[in-house]
Every structure is written in C-alpha cells, then in structure tokens.
Image (tube, rainbow, N blue to C red):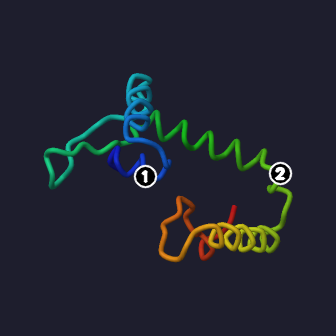
Amino acid sequence: MTARRLADRLQCDASTATSVIDRLEKRGLVRRVPHSTDRRVKVIELIPEGCALRDRVIRHTTEHSPFARLDRESRVRLHALLREVIDSAHPAGEPTAVKDNTDKEQR
C-alpha cells in the first residue's frame, strides 16, 4: 500500500500518514520499498515483526470485543444495521472507509 492510499483509508492528511509510517519504520515494523511499476512511488510493506504485531492486535481485540459473545447470525445482523447507518450518512457514490465483508465469514 502506498502512503497516499493509507492516508485515504485512514481519512487523514498525507503528512499524518507519513508521520505514522516513519514511526512504524523506526520501530522495525514496516519498510518502504520501490513500487513495481512507478519508481517515484514507495510501497509500505509490513515486515515479519509488523505482521506478528498486527496478528496479536487483531487476536486481542477480537477476543476482548463485547461483540465476541454474539453468535454469527447476530453479528451478521449487526453488520447489516451498521452498514445501513453508514450508507445513509454518505451520498450515493461517495466512498466510505469501511470495507464491506458481508460475504466473508464474520469473526
């Protein structure tokens, strides 16, 4: 992912994303590598330590989430309701930062 795309996903300024990337790079969690087709662009890549931290954070938040007590059907219903709220808050065609994983198995 590029810094620009990360900024878009986080809905923040590019300078903020760059600052976050700089800190992650100093901690040895990511690295900047040349883009495969555009040498002016750097791609932000998780290195093994970054992947391990990401996995621990996901596992921790999943296990300690108040939604973890809900069964799959309840989580799917909740997701549909939240999607409805998000979609009603944004005009048609305007991108949102929330990825729709309705078809994928919910954790």
Q: SS for tag 1?
A: helix
List the residue tagged with mark 2. 66
The kind of residue tagged 2 is: Pro
Question: Measuring 53% from the left and 63% from the top, which residue is drawn there?
Answer: 96
Check disc 1: other Cα within 10 Å, few if <14, some if 14-19, many if 20+.
Answer: some
In the rendered structure, find residue 79 and report the number of the disc placed on it. none
Question: Measuring 60% from the left and 72% from the top, which residue is drawn there?
Answer: 104
> Residue 100 falls in which quadrant of the image?
bottom right
The residue at the far front in this view is 91
The kind of residue tagged 1 is: Asp
Q: In front here: 74 or 96? A: 96
Whether residue 103 sits left or right of residue 39 in the image: it is right
Q: Position of residue 53 (x, y in %)?
A: 55, 36
Q: Position of residue 67 (x, y in %)?
A: 80, 56
Whether residue 43 sits left or right of residue 53 in the image: it is left
Question: Measuring 39% from the left and 22% from the top, which residue is drawn there?
Answer: 26
Q: In front here: 71 or 100? A: 100
Whether residue 15 sits left or right of residue 32 in the image: it is right
List the residue tagged with mark 1. 8
